[in-house]
Amino acid sequence: MTARIIDGVALSRALRAEIGERAGALAERGRRPGLAVLLVGDDPASAVYVRNKVRACAEHGLHSVLETHPATLAESALLDRVAALNADPAIHGILVQMPLPRHIDPAKVIAAIDPRKDVDGFSVASAGELMTGLPGLRPCTPWGCIKLIESTGVPIRGRHAVVIGRSNTVGKPMALLLLQAHATVTVCHSATADLAHHTRQADIVVVAVGRRHTVRADMVRPGATVIDVGINRDESGRLCGDVDFEPVRAALGPDGAITPVPGGVGPMTITMLLANTVQAAEAAP
Ligand code: NAP
């Protein structure tokens, strides 16, 4: 028997229904949650991402504004737009789609977002809240991974979690969220000497590298939960993750659980963006 699949589409659907209800309750009180999405330049992948975010808002009763700007937009002009949205009471979340054109410093732009509206959870303020265990807006992808792990019913508390990847947007916040949920956490990266040595001891593996077959069947132990954040293409152009899916699924056995790509972490990222926007609207003064 192979491991069960953790269905991110089904979990997203259930969570989005709850989010829609919370958005509806806020709208009845005259505070419809609002998300502003800023896109600078004409990167086709970014255009798809922002369209999906705006569509998800519309489907769940959130107000959204999509601002598209040419790649030549000056950094100061983008900062002015962020300042205007910070002051706009109809907007509770601000998302600046990355990557930005080279002449714009992303750190400066993220720092300009009011922390209460930082629904991506990428700012130093949000990172500090996570680091110190204060309430706040959590980065969407790792926060979605926590929901996926929780959905298996296996407690995180007391388990050994191995996170592969240490980016500021996925790996590091993932490790902190798991720590906050009382896991014992190991963080691996490109300089880790023997990755398999660590993953073989893990009850939970979260892999966020961006390289196919980073996790293979001989690297997991039966009964573990594997969360695959990676987005790659195989030789025939199909989407795939960082996990060698079918062999790993077989190696995990009937007590294991695994997310597919597509249909695992991906849908949860937008779901948690909606959740953060509603949370920001609920907390707004
Ligand atoms: P990133 O910034 O490139 O970070 C990749 C991490 O992987 C780095 O920490 C790197 O280590 C580590 N790494 C590279 N090679 C490794 C190896 N051989 N063994 C162990 N660790 C290794 O990427 P990211 O932004 O975190 O994203 C990771 C993947 O997740 C990408 O495929 C991205 O597309 C995907 N992603 C998906 C979603 C979603 O919604 N599904 C959201 C965000 C990202 P060093 O720090 O030592 O360089």
Image (tube, rainbow, N blue to C red):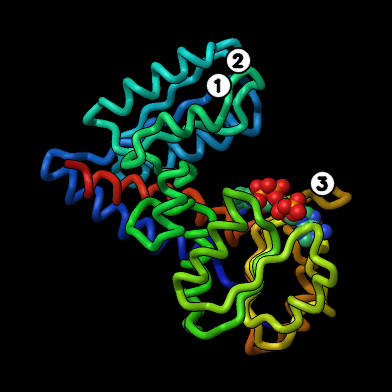
Q: Amino acid at mark 3?
A: Gly
Dot 2 crowding, Cα within 10 Å, few <14, some 14–19, many 20+: some
Q: Which residue is mark 2?
A: 71
Question: In this picture, is 154 found above or below 95?
Answer: below
Q: What is the distance, in whole Å, between disc 1 and disc 2 at their CAs?
A: 5 Å
Q: Earlier in the sequence, mark 2 or mark 3?
A: 2
Question: In this picture, is 29 found above or below 221?
Answer: above
Q: What is the distance, in whole Å, between disc 2 and disc 3 at their CAs?
A: 28 Å
Residue 40's disc number: 1
Question: In this picture, is 86 found above or below 56?
Answer: above
Residue 237's disc number: 3
Depth order, front residue of 271/187: 187
Expressed as whole percent of the image width and height from the top left, the position of residue 151 reads 47, 74
Q: Quadrant of the C terminus?
A: top left
Q: Earlier in the sequence, mark 3 or mark 1?
A: 1
Q: Are marks 1 and 2 in contact (CB under 8 Å)?
A: yes
Q: Earlier in the sequence, mark 1 or mark 2?
A: 1
Expressed as whole percent of the image width and height from the top left, the position of residue 43 reads 65, 26
Residue beneath the point at 51% across and 28% down: 108
Depth order, front residue of 40/17: 40
| Quarter holding residue 72 | top right
In terms of secondary structure, where does tag 3 sit?
Answer: loop
Residue beneath the point at 27% across and 41% down: 33
Residue beneath the point at 36% across and 40% down: 115
| Quarter holding residue 242 | bottom right
Using the rendered image of the protein, determine whether residue 260 is visible from the camera's viewpoint.
Answer: no
Q: Are marks 2 and 3 in contact (CB under 8 Å)?
A: no
Residue 185's disc number: none
Dot 3 crowding, Cα within 10 Å, few <14, some 14–19, many 20+: few
In terms of secondary structure, where does tag 1 sit?
Answer: strand
Q: Amino acid at mark 1?
A: Val
